[in-house]
Image: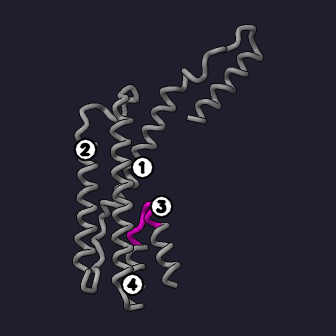
């Protein structure tokens, strides 16, 4: 988007320098669709980044201890909830790349809100897992596993915080 604007402005300046009839188009309206499309692409990239966190292709690590199965189930439940959020986006009845489809803003905000909730839930699972792990070695392994799983910034920050508290 910015490259197109830059080229347009450079071309308009060159035309103005060579002719008495300069280009005086409204740059905002010319690039409104391009800017809207770039924002839509950015939104979809955010969906992909959430996918990395909540729908990983790698299997979950095995969590030991008495609460290991509970930790695993909680993470699987979070992943299942994410799949429902994605299914809602897949089920939209309009072309999500059509910048004139204004319903996208509401649908995407619903998705983002759901992802934020899942981040909080995952952080709570990490907290619970750390709290119930008294063994130093096992807790270090647990934090390492969560560090490998943490893809989104809020989750990474939380794991880093728990790691700093541990060491």
Q: Across the whole image, how many numbered discs are drawn on residues?
A: 4
Q: Quadrant of residue 61?
A: bottom left
**Residue placed at 68% from the left, 20% from the top?**
12
**In the rendering, which numbered label is found on residue 141?**
4
Find the residue positioned furthest to the right.
17
Against 33, residue 48 (above or below) is: below
Q: Quadrant of residue 20?
A: top right
The Cα atoms of the two marked residues, 4 and 1, are separated by 29 Å
In the picture of the structure, the residue carrying the numbered disc 1 is 46
Decide: marks 2, 4 in contact (CB < 8 A)?
A: no
Give the mark nearest the N terminus, 2 or 4: 2
The Cα atoms of the two marked residues, 2 and 3, are separated by 24 Å
Give the mark nearest the N terminus, 4 or 3: 4
In the picture of the structure, the residue carrying the numbered disc 3 is 153
Give percent across and percent down for residue 166: 48, 83
Quarter of the picture holding the N terminus: top right
Q: Assign a secondary structure to mark 4.
A: helix
Q: Residues within 10 Å of mark 1 (few under 14, many from 20)?
A: some
Q: Assign a secondary structure to mark 1.
A: helix
Give the mark nearest the N terminus, 2 or 1: 1
Colour theme: one colour
Q: Nearer the viewer, mark 2 or mark 1?
A: 2
**Residue placed at 40% from the left, 55% from the top?**
49
The Cα atoms of the two marked residues, 3 and 1, are separated by 12 Å
In the picture of the structure, the residue carrying the numbered disc 2 is 88
Q: Residues within 10 Å of mark 4 (few under 14, many from 20)?
A: few
**Magenta extent:** 148-156
Against 143, residue 79 (above or below) is: above
Give percent across and percent down for residue 69: 22, 78
The Cα atoms of the two marked residues, 4 and 3, are separated by 21 Å
């Amino acid at each position: 988007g910015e490259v197109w604007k830059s080229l347009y402005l450079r071309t308009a300046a060159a035309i103005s320098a060579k002719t008495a009839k300069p280009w005086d188009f409204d740059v905002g309206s010319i690039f409104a669709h391009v800017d809207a499309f770039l924002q839509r692409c950015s939104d979809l990239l955010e969906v992909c980044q959430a996918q990395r966190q909540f729908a990983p292709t790698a299997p979950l690590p095995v969590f030991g201890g008495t609460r290991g199965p509970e930790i695993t189930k909680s993470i699987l439940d979070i992943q299942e909830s994410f799949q429902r959020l994605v299914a809602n986006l897949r089920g939209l009845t309009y072309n999500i790349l059509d910048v004139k489809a204004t319903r996208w803003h509401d649908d995407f905000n619903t998705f983002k809100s759901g992802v934020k909730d899942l981040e909080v839930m995952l952080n709570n699972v990490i907290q619970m897992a750390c709290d119930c792990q008294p063994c130093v070695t096992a807790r270090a392994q647990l934090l390492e596993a969560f560090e490998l799983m943490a893809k989104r910034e809020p989750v990474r920050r939380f794991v880093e915080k728990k790691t700093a508290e541990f060491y």
